[in-house]
Amino acid sequence: MGVSGTLEYLSEVLSNVKKSKKKKQTATVSIKIRMDCEGCARKVKNALSKVKGAKSVDVDLKQQKATVTGFVEPKKVLKAAQSTGKKCEIWPYVPYSMVAHPYAAGVYDKKAPPNFVRATADPSVVHLDPVEEQFSLMFSDENPNACNIM
């Protein structure tokens, strides 16, 4: 068979191997969904667990939040949640500490869970400008040269 025969055989074998699909990455999708009772929570959990690729579904009735973990897409999870007839949207909140101005208009939300504010992409709200940062550090507890009057 020789070297050329062996190379032809290997090229045929390798060309017949199907290209493997690119694997999806595990994603966590959180949804704010209006739930009033345990029956609503059970209905939402059943609907979200039927989404293709969902590995686990957690429903928090107190925070009005449902979290789906697995190989899922946010649009499909949202569509499945909307099929329950409940008012829902992608989880719009971030922790309070991640926003520089948590009481600014458009960020503060009375209906947000404790220690959460509405997410925003506005850079003037998310980050402190240099002057504000200087004043916040001036009165910081970690600064040993802070205000001596206190």
Image: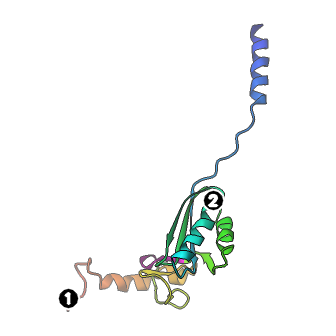
Q: Mark 2 vs mark 1: which is more N-terminal? A: 2
Q: Return the residue at label 2.
A: 72
- In the rendered image, residue 39, in percent from the top left (x then y), is placed at 55, 75
Q: Quadrant of residue 131?
A: bottom left
Q: Amino acid at mark 2?
A: Val
The region drawn magenta spans 93-98
Residue 75: x and y in percent read 68, 67
* Quadrant placement of the C terminus: bottom left
Q: Which mark is residue 94?
A: none
Question: Which of the 4 quarters of the picture holds residue 91?
Answer: bottom right
Judge by depth and name the residue closer to the eye, 34 or 105.
34
Residue 140 visible from this viewpoint:
yes
Check disc 1 and give the amino acid type: Asn
Which structural element holds mark 1?
Answer: loop
Q: Which of the image's four quarters has the N terminus? A: top right
Q: Badge 2, how many Cα within 10 Å: few under 14, some, many 20+?
A: many
Q: Residue furthest front?
A: 39
Q: Nearer the viewer, residue 89 or 81?
A: 81
Q: Are marks 2 and 1 in contact (CB under 8 Å)?
A: no
Query: Where's residue 98, x and y in %?
Result: 45, 76
Q: Is residue 91 visible?
A: no
- Within the magenta stretch, is there residue 104? no
The answer to whether 31 is drawn above or below residue 24 in the figure is below
The picture places residue 138, in percent across and down from the top left corner, at 31, 84
The residue mark sitting in front, 2 or 1, is 2
Report the Cα–Cα distance between label 2 and label 1.
55 Å
Q: Which residue is found at the position 61% from the left and 55% from the top?
A: 71
Outermost residue on the top side: it is: 1
Q: Quadrant of residue 10?
A: top right
Q: Residue at x 46, y 85 (%)?
A: 102
What is the residue that sits farthest to the left in this orientation? 149
- The residue that label 1 is drawn on is 148
